[in-house]
Image (spheres, grey):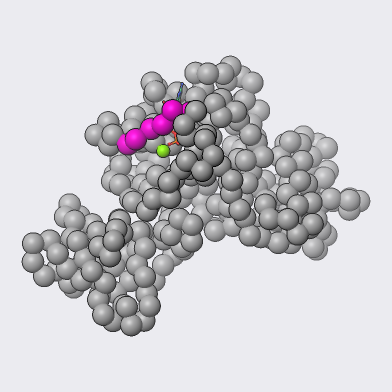
Amino acid sequence: MPSGDLIKVNGGNFYVKDNNKIIVCHASGKLRDYKVIPVPGDRVIYEELENDKGYIKQVEKRKNSLVRPAVSNIDQALIVTSLKDPDFSSYLLDKLLLQVLDNEITPLIYFSKVDKVNINDYMKYIEYYRSIGIECYYGNSLALENKKVLEEIFKGKKTILTGQSGAGKSTLLNSLDSSLNLKTSDISYSLGRGKHTTREVEFMEICGGLVADTPGFSSLKLDIDSARLSCIYPGFKNFGECKFRGCKHDKEIGCKIKNDVDDGIILRESYENYLRLLKDISGGKKI
Ligand SMILES: Nc1nc2c(ncn2[C@@H]2O[C@H](COP(=O)(O)OP(=O)(O)O)[C@@H](O)[C@H]2O)c(=O)[nH]1
Ligand SMILES: [Mg+2]
Ligand SMILES: [Zn+2]
């Protein structure tokens, strides 16, 4: 039986992409019996009936899956973060990175709206995140100079775009593929409270890969405990791990992470973001 990628779910219809064909499927009775709900990103086995219609028979084992938004088999997450409008926030970026790392997905960062700032003021961030092994890109999405480089990111992969509302996710995709015509919003509009609609995530074929533009979110809840935070925090694993088991890299004397901060290897601002998150988590606050 043929197989394909589930790219979109809408009102009980499952859109399965098999090469250049889209088959609109329903879930088979068996899937419903086992309460398997296919989500975008799933590799599925389907049976075609007629006129590009069919049934999903089976969902292949997922490599990973996210709950909000419900997607699966993600190879990488491209975090889009603006340098201006909305202002750059390393705290938000670190939180987004944490969310991606918590799901064991490879993060990449795109810094947008470089035309609105002096990029030299931000190179310390770009260099830092590169030094901890994260691919970083930057540009003016309204006049992309590094289009070729950015196109390469997506080839043969399933990518989700994530980042604050108004960061420029849709604009970037439109610039990479002008046939997309994704809706972009005025900053004043997109930053308005409660304005963003929670729509279903859909994978689009962009630059030879499947890309899902997730709805932006301005407040993001993470569900991790302090032990996990101290292990997976961006940068903490890169320069040799702290020797103290269970170290929170906070007040402990001789902590490797704190030494790295003092030596300028770990960006102090990012470490301070960590302490803020640690404090909130330890105090039982949702972050
Ligand atoms: N000057 C400038 N404006 C941008 C850039 N990227 C996005 N924008 C603008 O920022 C606003 C929000 O962009 P949008 O793509 O809708 O953000 P999204 O919510 O992340 O999808 C729109 O008005 C875009 O025109 C950029 O690189 N430079
Ligand atoms: Mg958008
Ligand atoms: Zn430590």
Q: Is residue 45 left or right of residue 93?
A: left
**Picture coordinates of residue 34, whole percent (x, y):** 36, 81
33 displayed left or right of 117: left
| Residue appearing at x 37%, y 53% in the figure | 200
Residue drawn where x is 28% and y is 34% of the image = 181
Left or right: residue 70 versus residue 121 is: left
Range drawn in magenta: 182-187
Looking at the picture, does residue 218 appear above or below residue 72? above
Q: Can you say whether 158 is above or below 85 in the image?
A: below
Q: Position of residue 177 (x, y in %)?
A: 29, 34
As displayed, is residue 87 above or below residue 134?
above
Query: Please, which residue is most extreme toward the right here?
Result: 253
Name the residue at 59% across, 57% down.
Answer: 102
Residue 3 sits in quarter:
bottom left
Q: In which quarter of the image is residue 54?
A: bottom left
Residue 110 visible: no
Residue 143 image point, x, y percent: 38, 21
Report the label total: 0
Q: Does the magenta stretch include residue 137?
A: no
| Residue 287 spot, x, y in % from top left | 67, 52
Q: Regarding ligand 2, which quadrant of the image does it lie in?
A: top left
Q: Which of 44 and 126 is in front in this view?
A: 44
Q: Is residue 103 left or right of residue 45?
A: right
Main structural element of the magenta stretch: helix, strand or loop? loop
| Residue for point 29% across, 74% down | 58
Residue situated in front as seen by the camera: 240 or 145: 145
Q: In which quarter of the image is the N terminus?
A: bottom left
- Res 193 seen here: yes
Q: Which of 100 and 82 is in front in this view?
A: 82
